[in-house]
Image (cartoon, grey):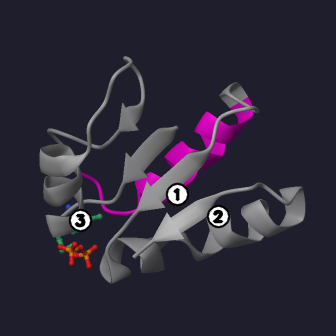
């Protein structure tokens, strides 16, 4: 399972409470912290790991940055899961 996040409380709670047992399973925008990171990161994670379940943890603000990616996800029929 691969998790990606937006920026904000969703990201901080995810970092604090998700248990990771393998490297490269938590994709988050630390440091520069760019809202809207979670969904495109998940598209990339899906392509790089077609057999993995990919989950986006997002805030409503971060989610709204990504209406273009919604189109990409729909067009490619990517099996992403969202938790907002
Ligand atoms: C592109 C961009 N704009 C503004 C910010 C500043 N900023 C950091 S967190 C945040 C609010 C995030 O809200 P939301 O995505 O709803 O997440 P929540 O904190 O509610 O989980 C803002 C405006 C940012 N990091 N990136």
| Residue at 26% from the left image edge and 37% from the top image edge | 19
Q: Is residue 55 left or right of residue 35?
A: right
Residue 71 sits in quarter:
bottom right
Q: Secondary structure at mark 1?
A: helix
Prevailing SS of the magenta stretch: helix
Is label 3 within 8 A of ligand 1 (CB to nearest ligand atom)? yes
Viewer-nearest residue: 18 or 6:
18
Q: Secondary structure at mark 3?
A: helix
Residue name at image x 74 percent, y 56 percent: 79
Mark 3, residue position: 10
Mark linked to residue 39: 1
Q: Which of the four quarters of the rendered structure image does ligand 1 lie in?
A: bottom left
Q: Earlier in the sequence, mark 1 or mark 3?
A: 3
Q: Nearer the viewer, mark 3 or mark 2?
A: 3
Cβ atoms under marks 1 and 2 closer than 8 Å: yes
Give the residue pinned by disc 2: 69
Residue 11 horizontal/vertical position (percent): 22, 56
Q: Which residues are magenta?
A: 33-47
On residue 7, which mark appears?
none
Q: Residue at x 15, y 58 (%)?
A: 13
Is residue 38 part of the magenta span, yes or no? yes
Q: Residues within 10 Å of mark 3 (few under 14, many from 20)?
A: some
Q: Is residue 14 left or right of residue 5?
A: left
Q: Estimate the x, y position of residue 22 in percent, counting from the top left.
A: 38, 18
Quarter placement of the C terminus: bottom left
Total marks placed? 3
State which tag comes first along the sequence, 3 or 2: 3
Residue 34, percent from left and from top: 28, 54
Establish if 83 lies above or below 23.
Answer: below
Q: CA distance from mark 1 to mark 2?
A: 7 Å
- Looking at marks 1 and 2 on the same chain, the residue that comes earlier in the sequence is marked by 1
Label 3 to label 2: alpha-carbon separation: 19 Å
């Amino acid at each position: 399972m691969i998790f990606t996040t937006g920026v904000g409380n969703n990201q901080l709670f995810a970092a604090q409470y998700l248990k990771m047992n393998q490297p490269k399973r938590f994709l988050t925008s630390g440091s520069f912290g760019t809202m809207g990171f979670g969904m495109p990161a998940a598209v990339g994670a899906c392509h790089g790991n077609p057999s993995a379940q990919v989950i986006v943890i997002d805030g409503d603000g971060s989610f709204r940055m990504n209406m273009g990616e919604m189109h990409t996800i729909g067009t490619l029929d990517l099996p992403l899961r969202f938790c907002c």
